[in-house]
Amino acid sequence: MRATLIALSLGLAGLAGPALADDGDRRELRVTGEGSIAVEPDMARLTLGVSRQARSAAEAMEETATAVAEVLDVLDGAQVAAKDIQTTSVNLSPIWDHSQNNEPPRVVGYQASNMLSVKLRDLAAMGGILDAVVGDEILPDRINEIRGISFSLADPDPVEDQARVKAVEDARAKAALLAEAAGLNLGPVVLLVDGASVAPQPGFPVGHERLMAADMPVAAGEVEIRATVTLVYEIAP
């Protein structure tokens, strides 16, 4: 708030400032309001990484494809819809041996990997799904892991609207405070810019060791939906 007041005072002194501007013969006051609503999430996005190493590229790809097929079977058995599962990347890269001194590195094998993005709409079932997906039969070594989990809302629109209302209220309160402090009379709002955004809880990496525990507990916490609006008031004479 102090920085905004300083900018306003500079504008009154004749310098350019972000809060007070001249638009031809019309003076304007520009303010930005913020609003946020914290709610429990109802959906999660899980990122699975499956990779395999083999002497040949074909073997690495085949073993990775088999592992991915097993993961998909587990997800299907957990009632995860096909539309909620998406392959995000498929990679194949050589494995180089740099151990021979004074010799150029040589290819000793290949590593294939496949990344899946999975939407989980039943958070209560997440612990059981994690436990099933990382069973020994599917992920036998540490190369493969759950890369991250993020939480969100399946339908954020109603909460976004609540956050917008709070943002407008915040902007109006700021404008009234600044106008009173500077001895200005506020005119009508001549511009309103909506900058609503969703801020889901950041995903977190989950190591293979952590996931091997049975019935993995997962705390969803809350997600915060934020909205910003910019109001431009005409300064009345």
Image (cartoon, rainbow, N blue to C red):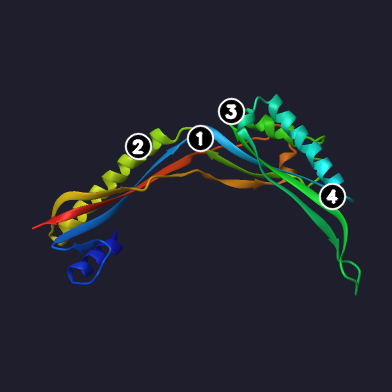
Circle number at residue 122: 3
How far is disc 2 from disc 1 in space, using C-alphas? 16 Å
Marks 4 and 3 sit apart, C-alpha to C-alpha, by 37 Å
Answer with the quarter of the image where residue 83 lies.
top right
Q: Looking at the image, is mark 2 or mark 3 earlier in the sequence? A: 3
> Is residue 57 or residue 51 the one in the foreground?
57
Q: Residue at x 73, y 44 (%)?
A: 114
Sequence-first disc among 2 and 1: 1
Task: State the separation of the CA atoms marked 2 and 3.
Answer: 25 Å
Determine which quarter of the picture holds residue 196.
top left
Mark 4 or mark 2, whichever is nearer to me: 4
- The residue under the point 28% across, 61% down is 4
The answer to whether the residues at label 2 and label 1 have Cβ atoms under 8 Å apart is no
Left or right: residue 209 compared with residue 2 = right
Give me the C-alpha separation between circle 1 and circle 4: 41 Å
- Could you tell me which secondary element the residue under label 4 belongs to? helix
Which amino acid is tagged 2?
Gln
Question: What SS does tag 1 mark?
Answer: loop
Q: Which residue is mark 4?
A: 57
Q: Residues within 10 Å of mark 3 (few under 14, many from 20)?
A: few
Q: Position of residue 122 (x, y in %)?
A: 58, 28
Q: Position of residue 128 (x, y in %)?
A: 68, 29
**How far apart are the two marked residues, 1 and 3, measured between alpha carbons?**
11 Å
Q: Residues within 10 Å of mark 2 (few under 14, many from 20)?
A: some
At which x and y percent is residue 153? 49, 35
Q: Residue 162, labelled with which disc? A: 2
Which residue is label 1 attached to?
Answer: 41
Residue at the spot x=50%, y=43% of the render? 200
Q: Pick the residue in front: 190 or 40.
A: 190
The answer to which of marks 1 and 4 sits earlier in the sequence is 1
| Residue positioned most to the front | 58
How far separated are the C-alphas under marks 4 and 2? Answer: 53 Å
